Image (cartoon, helix red, strand yellow):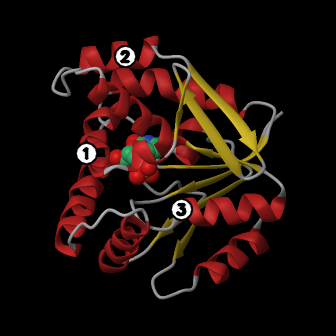
Amino acid sequence: MEDVIAIDGPAGAGKSTVARLLAARLSYARLDTGAMYRGVAYLALKRGVDFQNPAALAALAAAVRIEVAFRGAEMELRMDGEILNDQIRAPEVSERVKAVAACEGVRTVLVPAQRRLGAGHRVVCEGRDIGTVVFPDARKKFYLTASLEERARRRASELRGRGVDQPLDDVRASIRERDAMDAARRMGPLVVAPDAVVIDSTGVPIEQVVETLHRLC
Ligand code: DC
């Protein structure tokens, strides 16, 4: 039986950092489901799949071999044998992943894959629909959020750390657009699960956020 701690929330709310630190504290694995949507977008770009064609995106997701290795709080994701790291965080992938996340045929493939990957593990699982769709029976559910301005600043500085200089205005616009699409989609939209604890991390140091979650686990 798996033991799941779900962390959902909008882009740039600090989910990945918090999930990583919380998983390390609890000695749990970490499953980053956003990386899987990004991986499909990355492969679609690389293979010239038309992002306007949901059937083609769904066919790609269904055909690709997805493997995950849990190494402490780190997750190593492979798709068709390629280890996916920084390449799935590039702006051109972030720009296109929303079409992948909005594609119901892709979600139909990735949601069961996420359940399979979590099976039998103690896992901190982060995404948008973890507490509502993927693991509705999660032992603990958190919805992590922060103001748009703070999320944009965090995302811009994270990108700078990886050598990508994107103006704050562009990052803010891209996050705003992604939030709107995440909230509006029919399948697995970004909503707060009724039994989730909502944590607003605006102006709160990340260590303190982790401390709060840890206390509640
Ligand atoms: O968390 P992230 O920025 O890496 O997520 C990438 C994209 O995937 C983003 O557009 C939201 C989407 N996503 C989703 O629809 N469902 C999830 N469980 C995780 C991510």
Question: At x 55% / y 45%, what residue is drawn?
Answer: 130
Q: Secondary structure at mark 2?
A: helix
Q: CA distance from mark 3 to mark 1?
A: 21 Å
Position in image of residue 28 (x %, y %):
79, 51
Question: At x 69% / y 71%, what residue is drawn?
Answer: 213
66 left or right of 183? Answer: right
User: Could one spot residue 77 in this view of the protein?
Assistant: yes
Please say if 75 is above or below 44.
Answer: below
Name which residue type carries label 3. Answer: Lys
Q: CA distance from mark 1 to mark 2?
A: 18 Å
Position in image of residue 151 (x %, y %):
37, 72
**Of marks 3 and 2, which one's residue comes earlier in the chain?**
3
Residue that mark 1 sits on: 92
Name which residue type carries label 1. Answer: Glu
Position in image of residue 156 (x %, y %):
33, 70
Ligand 1 near label 3 (Cβ, under 8 Å)?
Answer: yes
114 left or right of 155? Answer: right
Residue that mark 3 sits on: 15
**Of marks 1 and 2, which one's residue comes earlier in the chain?**
2
Dots 1, 2 in contact, CB < 8 A: no
Residue that mark 2 sits on: 60
